[in-house]
């Protein structure tokens, strides 16, 4: 009897300990992250990550930028410690570089297991758990990381050397690499014991401190090196003088040495922190060096050479020295943290596509592509910005306008049930189509777009007075919203007498773009003919229009073509070189309604084949008029099309037209039923365990 009783107690104790451990992990999020069905997190955000360098990346940290337009900081903990990132139920490591809820700004690095070349994948960010503990970790996110916690240099990670009066000190989370005495060539150095391959960036948050009135010294270096004692290969970024106003670059490759003096100016006041990044990478079989200040590349520091830049593994190092002529100044480089991460020339981009909270959602996405951009480009990168509004709560001033939503394909499926207010596609988004922009309150529109994450407007343009739109376009640009002119929606340019009208319409917009303070970011030409050939006098072919648009527009202006269903597909290849993408209008259905994946795929197969063959990309546009029963059925269609074309590089996405009809559809969705009382499932398990214990205990006799 004692044996049975003892066995029962052991079983119950093990069960109870296991249960308590599970509850604790559920409450805090644990060290391994969260389940996609864990209700401890009140809000979630979907983020699209796009690879832009054409390379398959492994264990690559990607920057996620949060601000007031895409994230509500009040819904997260004050320090951001409740953030969690996952992909396909796998927890992702991350590190918060900056978190400023007062100014609503944050920069977070998320380490992705893999990214396929030129593909887009989706990750999930959750937040809104008041009991979650911080799991941000630089060590788990980067190849190398040290924030100098404690009062000693970590000898497992670093070697330290000094000459003369040079000194390395670590105190209160700051490492000082210093030259504290007035001697020529006094120096101190720390360098990593670990070496790194090419395609790496060495990032240091640093501050220069100088004592004395002479503006010379100390000399500070940050770089890669093969060996400190007998260097054969080195890349170093050197600063000196007041405000680090001299910035030099030096490379050593075997016996080849290159020096470049006074390339740029850090221009940071004495005692102010900044982030310095030295990138060493290979692109198109050419070795390159770039320098970044606070995340922004300074092109004056770019250097390209296979003869002067090594591709052998190197260590990273920091160095401080007194000025060579014994200046009376002394000083040091104060270092808050250092990290080394993988780097490619065209880095992956991240953009929020949806925010989930109590059934509401908003979406914003941008994706980089080569060629002309669908949004504003910066830093030499052509960025295609596409957005979606998924909220039904439009202001009355906006609801009378005609909206068009577009969705772009994502390579990763939605892995959890969604409560959809609008379409919840497995895809990226485009923007809205507006007509008569001054008929509504601009502030109300901007607020609506910002709340929904929309950053692109397709504007129906009347060429009689295109300048009437300048104030609107300028106001939109000031709010970070790009505007694209939609031309010739109701005109067939192949008809007699229409040629001059079509050419003049395009010329008017091109002239406006050349002279205006607020040029359009893109031009969309609506093709209203099954073929553009015509023998009628004064008729113009559409190829001429697209070729003219391509020749006259700048690189940051996109060109697109909207095509009717059953368009003469053989003509697509003729205009493909002059456009960035096509839009296929998959409506109206003549013999059967185009509201299913199979019907739409069959209807657009010919056009998509021609687009694919021409090396271009296409958006499939559907109409709510094709008898959709509810919003959820549209969501299912978006997901189905994205799945069907998931491996098709020609598939750019899906669009829906028109909003006025769409908003009248009911919202129907089968949702998972959950226990209304938090912890009910856990309580049931506890009761079951107690029952088992009682049963065993009752058999003791």
Image (cartoon, grey):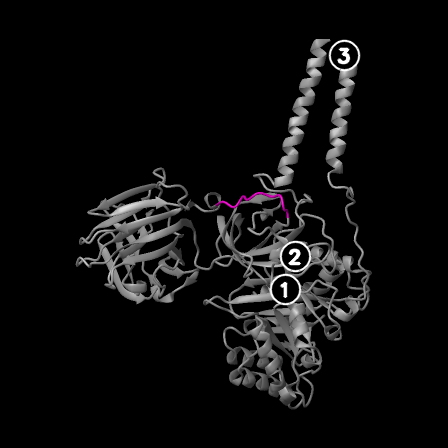
Q: Secondary structure at mark 3?
A: loop
Mark seen at residue 453: 1
Question: Which quadrant would residue 148 be assigned to in this image?
Answer: top left
Q: Which residue is mark 3?
A: 700
Location of residue 509 with respect to 6 vertically, above or below: below
Disc 2/disc 3 C-alpha distance (Å): 56 Å
Q: Looking at this view, is 503 or 188 the one in front?
A: 188
Question: Which quadrant would residue 575 be assigned to in this image?
Answer: bottom right
Residues at circles 1 and 3 in contact by the CB criterion of under 8 Å: no
Whichever of callouts 2 and 1 sits on the residue coming sooner in the sequence is: 2
Task: Give the image location of residue 521, x and y in percent.
Answer: 56, 75
Q: Is residue 635 left or right of residue 461?
A: right
Q: Which residue is mark 2?
A: 355
Magenta extent = 129-137
User: Which image quadrant: the N terminus?
Assistant: top right
Residues at circles 2 and 1 in contact by the CB criterion of under 8 Å: yes
Q: What count of labels does the image hold?
A: 3
Q: Looking at this view, is 95 or 117 the one in front?
A: 95
Task: Give the image location of residue 212, x and y in percent.
Answer: 25, 60
User: Which image quadrant: the C terminus?
Assistant: top right
Disc 2/disc 1 C-alpha distance (Å): 9 Å
Res 571 visible: no
Q: Is residue 142 magenta?
A: no
Whichever of callouts 1 and 3 sits on the residue coming sooner in the sequence is: 1
Residue appearing at x 69%, y 54% in the figure: 357
> Mark 1 Cα within 10 Å, few/some/many (few <14, many 20+)?
many
Q: Is residue 449 left or right of residue 668?
A: left
């Amino acid at each position: 009897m004692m044996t049975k009783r003892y066995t029962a107690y052991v079983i119950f104790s093990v069960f109870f300990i296991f249960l308590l451990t599970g509850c604790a992990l559920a409450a805090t999020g644990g060290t391994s992250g969260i389940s996609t069905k864990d209700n401890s997190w009140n809000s979630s955000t979907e983020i699209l990550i796009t690879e832009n360098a054409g390379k398959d990346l492994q264990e690559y940290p990607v920057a996620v930028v949060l601000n007031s337009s895409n994230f509500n900081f009040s819904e997260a903990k004050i320090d951001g410690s409740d953030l969690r990132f996952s992909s396909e139920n796998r927890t992702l490591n991350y590190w918060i570089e900056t978190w400023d809820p007062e100014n609503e700004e944050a920069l977070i690095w998320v380490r992705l297991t893999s990214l396929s070349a030129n593909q887009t994948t989706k990750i999930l960010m959750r937040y809104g758990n008041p009991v979650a503990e911080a799991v941000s970790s630089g060590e788990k996110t980067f190849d190398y990381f040290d924030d100098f916690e404690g009062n000693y240099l970590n000898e497992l990670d670093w070697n330290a050397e000094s000459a003369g009066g040079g000194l390395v000190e670590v105190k209160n989370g700051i490492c000082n690499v210093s030259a504290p005495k007035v001697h020529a060539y006094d120096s101190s150095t720390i360098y990593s014991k670990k070496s790194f391959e090419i395609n790496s960036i060495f990032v240091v948050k640093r501050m220069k401190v100088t004592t004395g009135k002479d503006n010379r010294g100390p000399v500070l270096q940050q770089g890669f090196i093969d060996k400190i004692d007998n260097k054969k290969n080195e890349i170093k970024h050197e600063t000196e003088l007041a405000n680090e106003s001299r910035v030099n670059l030096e490379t050593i490759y075997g016996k080849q040495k290159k020096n470049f003096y006074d390339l740029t100016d850090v221009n940071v006041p004495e005692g102010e922190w900044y982030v310095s990044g030295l990138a060493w990478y290979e692109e198109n079989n050419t070795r390159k060096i770039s320098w970044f200040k606070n995340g922004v590349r300074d092109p004056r520091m770019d250097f390209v050479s296979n003869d002067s830049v090594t591709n052998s593994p190197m260590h990273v190092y920091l160095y401080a020295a007194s000025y060579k002529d014994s200046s009376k100044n002394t000083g040091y480089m104060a270092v808050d943290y250092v990290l080394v991460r993988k780097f490619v020339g065209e880095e992956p981009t991240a953009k929020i596509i949806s925010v989930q909270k109590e059934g509401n959602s908003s979406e914003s996405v941008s994706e980089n592509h080569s060629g002309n951009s669908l949004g504003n480009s910066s830093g030499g990168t052509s960025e295609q910005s596409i957005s979606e509004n998924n909220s039904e709560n439009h202001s009355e001033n906006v609801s009378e306008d005609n909206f068009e939503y577009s969705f772009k394909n994502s390579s990763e499926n939605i892995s959890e049930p969604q409560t959809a207010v609008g379409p919840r596609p497995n895809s990226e988004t485009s923007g809205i189509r507006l007509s008569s922009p001054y008929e509504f309150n601009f502030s109300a529109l901007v607020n609506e777009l910002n709340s929904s994450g929309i950053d692109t407007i397709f504007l129906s343009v009347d060429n009689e007075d295109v300048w009437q739109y300048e104030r609107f376009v300028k106001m939109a640009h000031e709010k970070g919203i790009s505007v694209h002119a939609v031309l010739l929606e109701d005109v067939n340019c192949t008809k007699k007498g229409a040629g001059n009208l079509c050419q003049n319409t395009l010329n008017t917009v091109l002239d406006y773009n050349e002279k205006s303070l607020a040029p359009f970011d893109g031009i969309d030409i609506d093709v209203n003919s099954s073929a553009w050939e015509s023998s009628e006098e004064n008729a113009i072919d559409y190829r001429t229009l697209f070729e003219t648009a391509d020749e006259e527009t700048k690189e940051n202006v996109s060109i697109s073509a909207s095509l009717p269903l059953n368009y003469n597909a053989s003509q697509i290849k003729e205009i493909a070189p002059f456009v960035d993408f096509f839009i296929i209008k998959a409506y109206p259905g003549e013999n059967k309604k185009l509201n299913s994946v199979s019907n739409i795929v069959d209807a657009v197969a010919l056009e998509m084949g021609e687009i694919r063959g021409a090396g271009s990309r296409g958006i499939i546009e559907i109409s709510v008029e094709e008898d959709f029963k509810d919003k959820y059925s549209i969501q299912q269609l978006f997901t189905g099309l994205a799945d069907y074309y998931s491996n098709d590089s020609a598939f750019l996405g899906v669009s829906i037209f028109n909003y006025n009809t769409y908003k009248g559809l009911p919202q129907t969705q089968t949702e998972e039923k959950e226990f209304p009382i938090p912890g009910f499932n856990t309580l049931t398990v506890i009761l079951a365990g107690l029952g088992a214990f009682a049963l065993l205990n009752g058999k003791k006799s």
